[in-house]
Image (cartoon, rainbow, N blue to C red):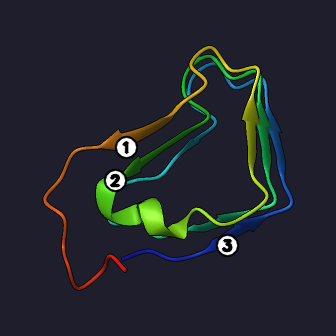
Amino acid sequence: AQTCTITGCYIYNNAAKGVNMGNNCLASLSGNLITTCGSYPLSLDANAVRVIGEGNSFSGNTVNMIEVRAETINELKVR
């Protein structure tokens, strides 16, 4: 899995999704503002939901929901 940290960022005015995490991406997200995007502020695989940290704000986007893409949950990864 690919890992990185996205912290304290202001992500705005994207034509589509604010952050689109690829398959098997486990980027840690905390303290970010994602706004005025043309679709979801955040899109990620079901196994990556655990990397959403505290202090993120998702508002003013065309779709104000997090897109969780379907996949088989790996019990070894999800806690």
Task: Classify 25 as above or below 43.
Answer: below
Viewer-side label of 3, 2: 2
Position of 59 compared to 79: left or right? Answer: right
Q: Quadrant of residue 72?
A: bottom left
Hey, what amino acid is under mark 1?
Answer: Val
Viewer-side label of 1, 3: 1
The first of marks 1 and 3 along the sequence is 3
What residue did someone put label 3 on? 5
Q: Marks 1/2: CA distance? A: 6 Å
Hey, what amino acid is under mark 3?
Answer: Thr
Q: Quadrant of residue 46?
A: bottom left
Q: Marks 1/3: CA distance? A: 19 Å
What residue did someone put label 1 on? 68
Q: Residue furthest bottom?
A: 76
| Residue 42 drawn at (x, y percent) | 56, 41
Hey, what amino acid is under mark 2?
Answer: Asp
Position of 8 compared to 63: left or right? Answer: right
Position of 66 compared to 68: left or right? Answer: right
Q: Which label was assigned to residue 45?
A: 2
| Residue 48 drawn at (x, y percent) | 40, 63
